[in-house]
Image (cartoon, helix red, strand yellow):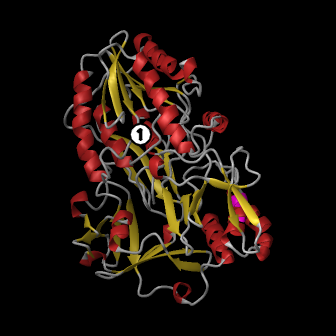
């Protein structure tokens, strides 16, 4: 299950849609099987960076108490082979997945609605290492725990003697009808947020199924599935793939900020890919605004603006955390954590003498939940319960705590600046920070996508991703589809850089840090 958040922005395929999409973009064209042309127009809004780092599972936080200690976990893949402990056939019913592992042969299967197919994403030990990198003995001889990391999300699996007949029977699993049924059955069975995101999968399925009788190729199939996903504002739920070498992704974001960004992108002509425009032009302009808010000579940065820090007027510190993954070139989670620690040490040492801190995650689109845990630990006064997560279909509830870092910390008043762009792992971080007595959230309500994104490789090579887990804060509240609202609300995101909306939002947070009194 992949995250929080996160949209790995720089590597996402472009979102495509058929004619009739609202964005005025020149369409790509394919020739259909009947010889006619079919147009698919790339929708302006595609992904951004939520889900930066995961593939099947999200990687939540450190410090949670659990019956199996972290040191018991070992790598699932060692020296290119499946470790003896993980070999066998294993069932993960809460995610609709099966694992068939021998030393050098791996099979991952997806199940939904009586269907079963071999997952096309996870076909060798390297991809399985990305999927379930750690394993430990469970609470009984016939059970195991897979995990995203020893201190991350744990998945309870049970041994099975054989794969179900549906996984073995011979049939054409690449036909358009099978793909349609696999997608809709998965969403009907494992998607927990139909109400929160305002979608009725059963109604959409029954309405679109008759159209499948006239669908004979992938272009026509994509036209139907475009209608299935239309208006579903959950960036962790999407369909991606290629047709004749041209990538597509069906996905939408929630909120006025993203709608305004989409409109601005559609009005320009320099960039023909939304993400290029977003990161190379718009986000760069935002970072320039943030720099002008800082006192001259105080700005420092690491990881190509992944972390930015300095000082604001009134001896207020400023620390922007703009990503929660990808700190090194092709780095994995362990490397990211090792790189992040020294950078945070430098930043917090520089800010040690400030009276309070503006902690800016308003442009953080996600990453790894473990990273959110490591950062939150730098501001924690003591161990505090943070949140729980649970797979929708009978998953075990797992609790996570925020545990104070043993080194450099900042325990003075903190004003946490958020926006609609704050998403996925950055929202998990927000939940952690809201549980600390010295923190006030200001700015805009966050995106509202906490669940990890479970990816299922379909038989035709397309990938279905969907939210499958329920996150709840320490009081049992679920914010999926709604986001986390600030204590002091005001606008943060403005598309027009000339208006200096982001700079003004930072300065307003600094003013609050100067005048507002925290009672803790």
Q: Position of residue 193 (x, y in %)?
A: 61, 54
Residue 318, quarter of the rendered image: top left
In the visual, does 45 lie left or right of 101? Answer: right
In the visual, does 54 lie left or right of 258? Answer: left
Residue 111, quarter of the rendered image: bottom right
Image quarter where the C terminus lies is top left
Determine whether 313 is above or below 419 in the image.
above
Give neighbour class at mark 1: few <14, some 14-19, many 20+ (Cα, 10 Å): many
Segment tinted magenta in the rendering: 224-228
Mostly what secondary structure, the magenta segment?
helix
Q: How many marks can you see?
A: 1
Q: Which residue is mark 1?
A: 429
Residue drawn 21% across the image and 31% down it: 408
Query: Most extreme residue toward the left, as rendered?
Result: 407
Determine whether 454 is above or below 429 in the image.
below
Image quarter where the N terminus lies is bottom left
Asked if residue 272 is among those painted magenta in the image, a careful observer would answer no
The answer to whether residue 516 is visible is: no
Q: Position of residue 302 (x, y in %)?
A: 30, 34
Q: Nearer the viewer, residue 242 or 407?
A: 242
Q: Position of residue 288 (x, y in %)?
A: 44, 24
Q: Position of residue 138 (x, y in %)?
A: 31, 70
Label 1 SS:
helix
Q: Nearer the viewer, residue 153 or 491?
A: 491
Residue drawn 50% across the image and 61% down it: 454
Q: Nearer the viewer, residue 138 or 300?
A: 300
The answer to whether residue 355 is visible is: yes
């Amino acid at each position: 299950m992949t995250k929080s958040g996160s949209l790995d922005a720089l590597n996402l395929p472009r979102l495509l849609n058929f004619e009739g999409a609202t964005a005025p973009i020149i369409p790509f064209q394919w020739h259909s099987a009947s010889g006619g042309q079919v147009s698919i127009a790339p929708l302006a809004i595609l992904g951004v960076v939520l889900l930066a780092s995961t593939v099947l599972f999200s990687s939540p936080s450190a410090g949670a108490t659990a019956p199996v200690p972290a040191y018991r976990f070992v790598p699932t893949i060692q020296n290119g082979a499946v470790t003896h402990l993980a070999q066998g056939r294993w069932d993960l019913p809460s995610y609709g997945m099966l694992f068939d592992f021998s030393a050098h042969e791996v099979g991952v299967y997806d199940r939904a609605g009586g269907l079963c197919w071999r997952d096309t994403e996870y076909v060798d030990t390297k991809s399985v290492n990305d999927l379930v990198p750690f394993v430990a003995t469970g609470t009984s001889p016939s059970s195991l725990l897979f995990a995203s990391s020893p201190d991350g999300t744990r998945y309870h699996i049970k041994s099975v003697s054989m794969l179900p007949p549906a996984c073995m029977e011979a049939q054409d699993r690449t036909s358009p009808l099978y793909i349609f049924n696999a997608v809709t059955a998965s969403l009907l069975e494992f998607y927990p947020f139909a109400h929160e995101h305002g979608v009725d999968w059963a109604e959409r399925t029954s309405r679109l199924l008759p159209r499948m009788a006239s669908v004979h190729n992938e272009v026509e199939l994509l036209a139907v599935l475009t209608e299935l996903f239309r208006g579903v504002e959950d960036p962790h739920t999407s369909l991606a793939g290629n047709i004749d070498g041209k990538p597509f992704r069906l996905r939408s974001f929630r909120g006025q900020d993203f709608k305004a960004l989409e409109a601005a992108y559609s009005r320009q002509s320099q960039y023909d890919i939304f993400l290029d425009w977003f990161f190379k032009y718009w986000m760069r302009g935002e970072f320039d605004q943030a720099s002008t808010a800082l006192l001259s000579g105080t700005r420092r940065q690491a990881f190509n603006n992944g972390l930015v820090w300095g000082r604001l007027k009134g001896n207020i510190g400023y620390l922007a955390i703009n990503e929660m993954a990808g700190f090194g070139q092709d780095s994995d989670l362990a490397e990211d954590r090792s790189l992040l620690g020294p950078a945070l040490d430098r930043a917090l040492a520089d800010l040690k003498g400030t009276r309070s801190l503006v902690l800016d995650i308003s442009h953080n689109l996600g990453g790894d939940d473990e990273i959110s845990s490591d950062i939150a630990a730098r501001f924690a006064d003591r161990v505090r319960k943070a949140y729980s997560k649970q797979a929708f279909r009978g998953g075990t509830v797992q609790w996570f705590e925020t545990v104070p870092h043993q080194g450099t910390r900042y325990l003075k008043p903190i004003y946490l600046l958020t926006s609609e762009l704050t998403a996925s792992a950055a929202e998990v971080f927000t939940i952690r920070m809201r549980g600390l007595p010295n923190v006030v959230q200001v700015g805009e309500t966050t995106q509202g996508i906490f669940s990890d994104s479970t990816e299922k490789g379909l038989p035709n090579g397309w990938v279905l991703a969907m939210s499958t887990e329920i996150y709840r804060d320490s009081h049992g509240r679920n914010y999926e589809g709604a986001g986390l609202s600030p204590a002091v609300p005001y606008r943060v995101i403005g598309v027009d850089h000339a208006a200096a909306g982001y700079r003004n939002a930072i300065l307003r947070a600094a003013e609050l840090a100067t005048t507002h009194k925290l009672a803790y």
